[in-house]
Amino acid sequence: MNFSDKIKPFVLTACVAVLLFSALPAYAVKVQIFKPVDPEKEVSQRVLRQEAVTEAFAQALFAEASRMLPGTLSAERTEAVKKAFGSYYEEYINGYKDMNVKMSEDGVSVSIDVSVNRKSLRAAMKKMGLFSSSVVPVQIDVSNEKFTLNEEGQLEQNEKINELIVLYGLSNATVADSNKTASVLSVRHASKNRWTGDLQSSGGKWFASGSSMERVWRELWGKYYGSENIEALMNPKAVLVVSGWFNPEGVREFGRKLKSWDSAVQEVELLDVEMQPTAVSASWSLEVSDQWVLRGYLNDYLPPRGLTFSLEGLEEAK
């Protein structure tokens, strides 16, 4: 074996390593928003700026979440989800860059590129019930116990409860459920800085405690939806195999193109590259959000370039 024969495996390994590195996912969402000044509210520029930046993060998260949703949300639930993303956006982003904030007399404009942590976002969406197929009927009992609220405080609490009902895809069962199909949620203001609660359903019983009613609610319904088997409602996973290239550079170029089809596929990851004497082939794992669109892209892009493909683990589109 001469030196050139020894170096070939190293070159192939290096090529594959470079390709794998270039295939690492980067889910950056570019957002541009304008938050106008509300003439009826006296808000400092600092507060208005922070509110605008928060809305930009929430908008980026919702844009990415929309690509994973199996359907569309009502306008009311859409607003509730965006508001929730604005409250907890730090949990679902890896970072951001190119933030540009401009203040004017009319309001604040924000432009920013947000890197979304899709794994954390998907887990949060599941715990909100966004992948669930139906509305959940529930009997709700929120007790302030000895911490009696005044009229304004009670109205604020009722508004928050209604907002949480919409956010988590629930329906308030205000009368006794004779068929025992409704879940039962009980949340109590146990001490000055402590709330407790429990949730009972046909699927189990869960307990939680926290510093606010919202935190307890969030934990209980996260456990409820987290226990559901909803994989069938989420984007199906598949393996795409493409062959016919003459060199690995074609694999890299197509990998970039494949990731740009984010209306059809998500979570694209290069699995392997195979170097054969006559051609190079490669395979990717991916989640298919729209099979019709994906097959259209593949048929338009690959055969004219002398490439063939197969989708494994995915039922043929009808």
Image (spheres, rainbow, N blue to C red):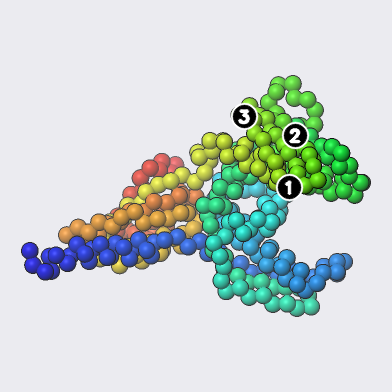
**Image quarter of the N terminus:** bottom left
Q: Position of residue 103 (x, y in %)?
A: 73, 77
In the picture of the structure, the residue carrying the numbered disc 2 is 186
Tell me the element at label 2. strand
Q: Nearer the viewer, residue 57 or 213?
A: 213
Determine the residue positioned at 41% across, 63% down.
Answer: 257
Residue 297 location, quadrant: bottom left
Q: Amino acid at mark 2?
A: Ser
Tell me the element at label 3. strand
Q: Earlier in the sequence, mark 2 or mark 3?
A: 2
Q: Position of residue 96 (x, y in %)?
A: 57, 68
On screen, residue 300 versus residue 4, left or right, reads: right
Q: Is residue 138 visible?
A: no
Q: Position of residue 286 (x, y in %)?
A: 42, 51
Q: Position of residue 311 (x, y in %)?
A: 36, 48
Q: Amino acid at mark 3?
A: Gly
Q: Nearer the viewer, mark 2 or mark 1?
A: 1
Q: Nearer the viewer, residue 93 or 144?
A: 144
Q: Amino acid at mark 1?
A: Ser
Q: Is residue 173 above or below residue 272?
A: above
Give the CA separation, mark 2 to mark 1: 16 Å
